[in-house]
Image (cartoon, rainbow, N blue to C red):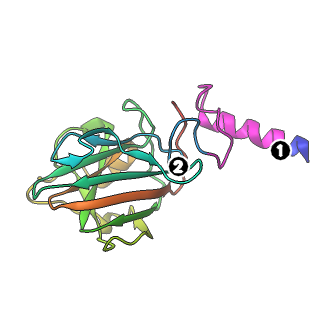
Amino acid sequence: MRLKTLIASALVAVSLGSGATAAAAPAGHECATPSIDRYQQWLASGEGTTEPATGSILVPEGRHRYAAKIKFLNPEWHVMVLWLGNQFEAQADLSRSRGFLMTYSATDDLYVQLRPASDWSGGAKWVTKIPSTRGKVVSRFFSFHPDKWTTLAELGAPAYPLSEALDDARGLVFVGKTPNDLVFKGLKVDGYRPPCVY
């Protein structure tokens, strides 16, 4: 049984790549630094009035657990960023992924943009709606099927199909134009497991 465990651990390390930090956390475990489902970079971007204004939004919640908390404060566009590969330069191939399961609470509706590395900047991105939970924590699945994604006229339409954004996905960017109290407690992307890099 011990041999099988060692072989499984070795396969996990190989699948994560050659970096020693990427293979440091065993399967099913969090990273050595604060993370939620191994996602370490939950960031207030400084765009829009938010609390906190910039930097990590991860806060301790119970023993060895974290939540990502941010408040959108004014009726203006706000931006909160999650780097899928835990560093800005990284990207993930989500072309075969069905979508993501997110555990969260929100006091108002907002949107999430799928931003590719090839066209990171600007607001003209594919979006899907993240419904308000009226402050209750819920788990919902958000599909990557093209029928579930749209554009916002105010932000503009991207010049590429959703499939291209899935090929080189750099981050999920949460945007909203209304005051909102947001808490994120879980995120699992089908077919993708982020490496620990910090």
Secondary structure under badge 2? loop
Residue at 48% x, 57% y is 186
Q: Which residue is mark 2?
A: 192
Measure the alpha-carbon separation of dots 2 and 1: 21 Å
Secondary structure under badge 1? helix
Q: Amino acid type of disc 2?
A: Tyr
**Residue 190 location (% of width, % of height):** 52, 57
Q: Is residue 164 above or below residue 134?
A: above
Q: Amino acid type of disc 1?
A: Thr
In this rendering, would 144 be left or right of 181?
Answer: right
Of the two numbered discs 2 and 1 in the rendering, the one whose residue sits closer to the viewer: 1
User: Toward the viewer: 147 or 110?
Assistant: 110
Residue 152 in view in this figure: yes
Residue at 12% x, 56% y is 74
Start-end of magenta stretch:
5-29
Residue 159 in view in this figure: no
Q: Is residue 146 above or below residue 38?
A: below
**Residue 32 location (% of width, % of height):** 59, 35
Residue at 53% x, 36% y is 33
Q: Which residue is mark 1?
A: 5
In this rendering, would 141 be left or right of 111?
Answer: right
Point out the tag, 2 or 1, that comes first from the N-terminus.
1
In this rendering, would 189 be left or right of 1?
Answer: left
